[in-house]
Image: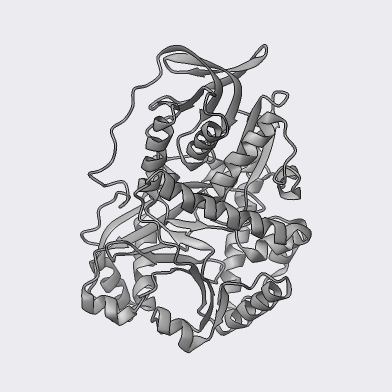
């Protein structure tokens, strides 16, 4: 980083508060009491992020008399669900390219199910009056290098060949800069309907209220400590009590699964983001962004960015930090060297915004798996279901995962449970120190590919053949 660029980036961060912007909201609901003593229920949901909240809500919609209990280790939405970028995508496969590579035969069905799932989220926002700044503005994947322009054109051709191009538009340099003006933008693909922007914390809090209104019993500051079979049901031990349930749905994602054999399938990755102060009318005019789409660049080490309801810009991504041993550590939630790097990249993208300052800087762990998209399964003879591995695309896909878990717990064969995506598992991560070394080599190789026209080295090509990867 050049000294001048470094000074500009550092100056922009001088007032940034080290807390997630979304969670610093005066409208945040108070915590509900912890579970004490013994409780019984039909369905116990473990985890108060999107995965657990959608599962509990859908369970009550399917059967209003079902007794549903949800336990959360801290407060609803405090982790990844409350601090993400707010991109609610229809894709269930971490994008078209990943879906095509892994499930080409059922990709049209996966795309249809994903679109229906996003429609259902939009309907739920209206039905339950979820005040979460929901805007179905779409997303533009932008090219910032010439080789990425070619790659996006190839992707569009494949989308069109499969008959999936409705609402998808290939943009040249002038067209993409007419939408959002950056001198780094060379082209893009605009998915006009497949992504919505929202306030992630407000979505979690709204789902919490909707669950309570339907009769879900929620206990916060109640981690699930141990899962044991109890005859016809399952028991989960908590710090101050115990819940016995006929069925259990696990929505713990990045946190260690109560089903220990699931743990090798995911690792934590630390992701970081910045939020600017609100843009002035002049600053907003200098970048355009009248259609308020989400954006992401096409590099391996990518940035995601969007504009908020009050005209701030969230800028995140690039670094994906894996801790040795996969151990969660709150000390990694902040990484000044990454904030500095992100700020420098921001002003490279938007030089016309020089002088804009960042109000918040934060990070945290998400779960990733080797196929970049969620996997599902059951344990304890079908009495427990789980969904995990959403790899940064859980705002929308967790609702689909909730439906899958409920289908599996009911023993039902549905269009969801028939999917190869649902019936198959990703390859697990190897034990340490192999995982650390392999992820390190993969990250280095991805950075090299970004610097050399996207050319993937022998290591990445071998990973591609084995269906292995690492992403945030």
Q: Is residue 396 above or below residue 158?
A: above
Residue 422 screen position, x and y as percent: 71, 45
Identify the residue at horizontal 34%, vertical 79% (top origin). 288
Classify residue 166 as left or right of residue 335.
Answer: right
Residue 224 visible in the snapshot:
no
Q: Nearer the viewer, residue 329 or 360?
A: 360
Which quadrant of the structure image shows residue 293? bottom left
Classify residue 292 as left or right of residue 244.
Answer: left
Q: Nearer the viewer, residue 216 or 185?
A: 216
Q: Quadrant of the N terminus?
A: bottom left
Identify the residue at horizontal 42%, vertical 40% (top origin). 207
Residue 339 visible in the snapshot:
yes
Which quadrant of the structure image shows residue 182? bottom left
Residue 162 screen position, x and y as percent: 73, 70
Tell me how the rendering is colored: one colour
Residue 372 screen position, x and y as percent: 62, 54
Residue 274 screen position, x and y as percent: 34, 60
Q: Is residue 226 above or below residue 109?
A: above
Tag count in the figure?
Answer: 0
């Amino acid at each position: 980083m050049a000294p001048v660029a470094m000074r500009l980036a550092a100056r922009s961060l001088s007032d940034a508060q080290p807390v997630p912007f979304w969670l610093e909201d005066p409208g945040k609901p108070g915590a509900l009491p912890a579970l004490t003593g013994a409780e019984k229920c039909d369905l116990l949901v473990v985890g108060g992020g999107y995965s657990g909240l959608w599962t509990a809500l859908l369970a009550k919609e399917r059967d209003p008399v079902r007794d549903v209990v949800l336990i959360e280790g801290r407060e609803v939405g405090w982790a990844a669900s409350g601090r993400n970028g707010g991109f609610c995508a229809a894709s269930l496969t971490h994008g078209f390219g990943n879906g095509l590579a892994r499930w080409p035969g059922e990709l049209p069905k996966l795309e249809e199910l994903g679109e229906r799932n996003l429609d259902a989220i939009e309907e739920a926002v209206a039905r339950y009056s979820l005040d979460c700044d929901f805007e179905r503005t779409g997303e533009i994947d932008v090219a910032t290098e010439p080789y990425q322009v070619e790659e996006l054109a190839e992707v569009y051709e494949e989308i069109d060949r499969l008959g999936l191009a409705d609402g998808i538009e290939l943009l040249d340099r002038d067209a993409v800069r007419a939408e959002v003006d950056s001198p780094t933008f060379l082209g893009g693909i605009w998915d006009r309907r497949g992504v919505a922007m929202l306030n992630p914390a407000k979505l979690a809090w709204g789902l919490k209220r909707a669950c309570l209104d339907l009769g879900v019993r929620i206990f916060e500051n109640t981690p699930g400590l141990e899962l044991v079979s109890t005859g016809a049901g399952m028991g989960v031990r908590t710090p101050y009590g115990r819940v016995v349930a006929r069925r259990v749905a696990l929505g713990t994602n990045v946190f260690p699964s109560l089903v220990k054999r699931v743990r090798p399938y995911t690792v934590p990755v630390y992701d970081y983001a910045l939020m600017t102060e609100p843009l002035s009318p002049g600053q907003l005019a200098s970048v355009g962004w009248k259609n308020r789409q989400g954006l992401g660049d096409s590099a391996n080490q990518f940035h995601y960015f969007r504009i908020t309801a009050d005209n701030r810009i969230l800028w995140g991504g690039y670094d994906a930090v894996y801790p040795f041993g996969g151990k969660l550590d709150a000390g990694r939630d902040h990484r000044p060297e990454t904030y500095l790097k992100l700020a420098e990249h921001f002003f490279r993208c938007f030089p016309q915004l020089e002088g804009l300052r960042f109000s918040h800087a934060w990070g945290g762990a998400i779960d990733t798996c080797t196929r970049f998209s969620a996997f599902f399964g059951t344990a304890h003879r079908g009495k427990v279901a789980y969904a995990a591995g959403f790899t940064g695309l859980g705002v929308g896909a967790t609702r689909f995962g909730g439906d899958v878990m409920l289908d599996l717990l009911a023993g039902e064969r549905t269009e969801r449970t028939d999917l190869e995506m649902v019936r198959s598992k990703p390859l697990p991560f190897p034990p340490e120190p192999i995982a650390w070394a392999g992820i390190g080599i993969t990250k280095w190789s991805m950075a090299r590919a970004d610097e050399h026209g996207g050319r993937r080295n022998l290591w990445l090509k071998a990973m591609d053949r084995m269906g292995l990867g690492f992403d945030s």
